[in-house]
Amino acid sequence: MGKQTPQESTDKVAANGLINRRHLLSLSLGGVGMAVANTVLGQELQIPSWSRMPGPGPSAYGNRSPYAENMLRLIYNTDPLYPGGGGSRSPLQHLHGTITPNSLHFERHHAGIPAINPEQHKLVINGLVRQPLVFNYEALLRYPMVSKLYFVECSGNSGALLRQAEPDQSGTAQSLHGLVSCAEWTGIPLSTLLDEAGVLSEANWVAAVGADAASMGRSILLGKALDDSMVALFQNGEPVRPGQGYPLRLLNPGWEGNTNVKWLTQLKLTAEAPHFRDETSKYTDTLPNRFSLKFTFPMGTKSLITSPSGQMMLEKPGIYRISGIAWSGSGGIRRVEVSADGGRSWAEALIEGQLNEKALTRFSIPWEWSGGEAVLQSRATDNQGSVQPTRDTILAERGNITAYHNHCIQSWGVNTMGEVRNVYA
Ligand SMILES: Nc1nc2c(c(=O)[nH]1)N[C@H]1C(S)=C(S)[C@@H](COP(=O)(O)O)O[C@H]1N2
Ligand SMILES: [Mo]
């Protein structure tokens, strides 16, 4: 977040009602508050019944309020031909901050969730190593660990925007983009385990395989494996959930979701990539000239307004908090800009909280809705200068044979009734 130029700081309200930070801080925080909150002066506060009676006591495992039970994952594609296949999407429009609660982390399984007893699970490291090793869960718990915030995003996320010529009017942040989540992952740096096995100089790849019925395998570049890949055992402080790969999963920060092999059971060092099913027939981008890109590992620079977003309703003209998430598979987010006029003018959003590499970042900006039509967009720039592209740019560059790795700008149209819909702009 660089210094503002004098020109920007005198610019009180950016085009189309976006209120820039300087204006908000120097002049009108109070003004905004007054406009948003209802005044309570002169009214007698009613004492609600729940403050008179003792409620239930503590519980062994906490639950959320029954008033917050509308936050649910959206399950898709439970085709009986593929038992356990399909997935579920995170309710991005209901989530705040940057951490996805474990119960709401999106899921993608190719053959369901195996019921693994950690006492019977093994992790093998073999292939081009000096000393093949086998670890049980108990042994892994004794290694030094690191804890980091990382997003996981399926490379099929947001694919509908490329597949569908007309925008899905019923689309929500969740239904269109909910295959991304973010957690604090705790685990052993993969480099620690590979060092112990002793990687031979001919090795270039780590072939990772899961213990599910899909026997999912992915090839990881040795450089990545030695850089920041980890064998994750904990997710937001508790054991990795069965849906996320209990008792352990591979995590390749910033890389396409599929490479994060769940229920990890084998790491084989190889000279060549084994070309598993999920890195050839799937998760591969075919270009208009029918050539396919061999591997696409880091996820693109991306952002999404989660509020207001598809299927929400603005009740009346006034000041709203535009808020959303931004992320990049190549590092941190440098800035996020927001437009209320379909990309003609942009204002810089406030980054809320810390900037973590390869993790979700929360942004927001106040916006005064006049009651007219608007098209809300956000555009992220990562700290290597890569800027989130428009849908038209992606289609022009890659066509739509592939719908994987779509990181285009999402447009939410607001009509004069205040209805928010997925639009192409
Ligand atoms: N063993 C195994 N690992 C797997 C999968 C799978 O089906 N089996 N699905 C992959 C896909 S496609 C994605 S996007 C991520 C999803 O991780 P999550 O379910 O924890 O969100 O896991 C990956 N790892
Ligand atoms: Mo995926």
Image (cartoon, rainbow, N blue to C red):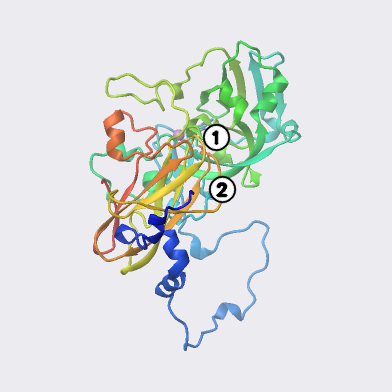
Tell me if residue 419 comes above or below residue 402 in the rendering. below
Q: Measuring 45% from the left and 46% from the top, which residue is drawn there?
A: 335
The alpha-carbon separation of the residues under discs 1 and 2 comes to: 18 Å
Amino acid type for the residue under numbered disc 1 = Pro
Q: Nearer the viewer, residue 405 or 343?
A: 343
Position in image of residue 192 (x %, y %): 69, 27
Circle 1/circle 2 CB separation < 8 Å: no
Q: Secondary structure at mark 2?
A: helix
Position in image of residue 32 (x %, y %): 42, 70
Residue farthest to the top, as pictured: 202
- 421 to the left or right of 118: left
Q: Which of the marked residues, 1 or 2, is nearer the chain's N terminus?
A: 2
Tell me if residue 37 comes above or below residue 175 in the rendering. below
- The residue that disc 2 covers is 102
Q: Secondary structure at mark 1?
A: loop
Tell me if residue 191 comes above or below residue 157 in the rendering. above
Q: Residue 253 shows which numbered tag?
A: 1
Residue farthest to the front, as pictured: 6
Some atom of ligand 1 lies within 8 Å of the CB belonging to the residue at label 2: no
Q: Measuring 61% from the left and 37% from the top, which residue is drawn there?
A: 246
- 223 to the left or right of 26: right
Position in image of residue 179 (x %, y %): 44, 42
Some atom of ligand 1 lies within 8 Å of the CB belonging to the residue at label 1: no
Amino acid type for the residue under numbered disc 2 = Asn
| Crowd band around label 2 with a 10 angstrom C-alpha radius: few (<14), some (14–19), many (20+) | some
